[in-house]
Structures are given as structure tokens and as C-alpha cells.
Image (tube, rainbow, N blue to C red):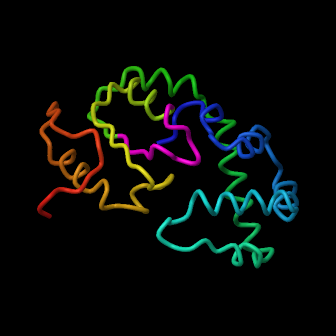
């Protein structure tokens, strides 16, 4: 989940600065072709990759116009959502959330500061916080074995059952 008002929670200052502005598509494509834009793409590759696979900076260098256009379009849509969303409405809805919830995040998430997830957990009165270590921003993709047991217990639990653990570890006999 994206915590409400995510601008303040982005750990990466460069991304926070980039996302403050609504970029027209052509300006974003132009920026991504620049040296700073390529640095942004490289940093994005580090954050949004599967940590079990090697970085592929060479692939980034060879992005052709069409693929770069797709990347800039996705980024433009994300920026649009960030600026158009009524975050105060979401904050109000979340205050009244009463469904069983599990939040999975990495302690060293390179994109969103861990305190954002902790705050979201407090707002939701979430008792099922699973904190991974070293799994990156996309914990389920990078280390599914770290969260599978906790996720399975959560999905099979009776509503209101608080027997879920707070740490991500594999069961002894699986």
C-alpha cells in the first residue's frame, strides 16, 4: 500500500523533488534522456529490481525511444495520481478501517521510510506487521520465503486471532 501523502515519506530526495511537479509527457521524456534522468533511472533500477538478480545498467543505456516513452508515460501517470488523489479523504477513511490487515515492509526500504509503514499500522490498528530485513522495497518478490509463513498464518487465521508473529522468519519444518 502507498501511505497517504507519500511525498513526505519518500526516502530518496531526488525522487521526492521530481514528483513534486506535474510533468507534461514531452518534458519528462526529455528529462529521462539527460544525464540526471539516466541517474534517476539507474537509482530506480536499484530500488525496483529483484535483489536476487544482477543490476542491468547496460539495459538502461540501450533504452530506445519507444521503451523510454513507456517508462516516462508510467512515471507521468504515477505523478498524476500523486497530485490528483484526495489524500485527506484517504486519511479519514483509514482512521475508520476495521478489517484485518497485514502490512509487510522492509526495515531498510530504499523508497519509503519505515516510519511511514509504522504510522500506517498505528492508523489501521494493525496487529500484523511483518518486518523483513534486506528484502528491499518489493519484499514478496525478492524473498517470498521470508513472508510466506506469516502470510499463510494471517490468511488462515480466524478474524480477531492475534497469534501472528511480528517478525519474518521461516518455520522450522516446512
Residue 153 falls left or right of residue 87: left
Residue 20 at x, y = what percent? 76, 37
- Figure label count: 0
Is residue 153 covered in magenta?
Answer: no
Residue 134 at x, y = what percent? 45, 54
Quarter-of-image position of residue 48 = bottom right
Residue in the image at 72% along x and 59% along y: 73
Residue 125 at x, y = what percent? 33, 25
Q: Is residue 145 above or below residue 77?
A: below
Residue 117 falls left or right of residue 126: right
> Foreground residue, 170 or 129?
170
Image quadrant containing the C terminus: bottom left
Residue in the image at 68% along x and 58% along y: 43
Quarter-of-image position of residue 107 = top left
Residue in the image at 62% along x and 40% along y: 11
Q: Is residue 93 above or below residue 30?
A: above
Residue 5 falls left or right of residue 155: right
Q: Is residue 20 above or below residue 90?
A: below
Residue range in magenta is 103-115
Residue in the image at 32% along x and 30% along y: 126
Quarter-of-image position of residue 60 = bottom right
Amino acid at each position: 500500500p502507498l501511505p497517504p501523502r507519500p511525498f513526505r515519506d519518500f526516502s530518496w530526495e531526488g525522487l521526492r523533488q521530481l514528483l513534486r511537479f506535474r510533468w507534461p509527457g514531452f518534458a519528462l521524456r526529455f528529462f529521462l534522456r539527460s544525464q540526471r534522468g539516466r541517474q534517476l533511472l539507474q537509482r530506480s533500477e536499484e530500488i525496483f529490481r529483484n535483489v536476487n538478480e544482477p543490476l542491468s545498467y547496460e539495459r538502461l543505456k540501450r533504452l530506445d525511444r519507444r521503451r523510454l516513452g513507456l517508462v516516462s508515460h508510467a512515471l507521468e501517470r504515477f505523478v498524476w495520481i500523486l497530485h490528483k488523489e484526495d489524500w485527506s479523504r484517504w486519511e479519514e477513511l483509514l482512521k475508520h478501517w476495521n478489517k484485518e490487515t497485514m502490512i509487510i515492509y522492509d526495515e531498510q526500504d530504499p523508497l519509503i521510510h519505515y516510519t511511514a509503514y509504522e504510522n500506517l499500522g498505528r492508523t489501521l490498528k494493525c496487529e500484523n506487521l511483518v518486518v523483513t530485513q534486506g528484502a528491499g522495497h518489493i519484499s514478496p518478490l525478492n524473498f517470498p520465503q521470508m513472508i510466506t509463513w506469516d502470510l499463510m498464518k494471517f490468511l488462515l487465521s480466524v478474524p480477531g486471532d492475534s497469534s501472528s508473529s511480528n517478525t519474518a522468519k521461516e518455520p522450522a519444518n516446512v
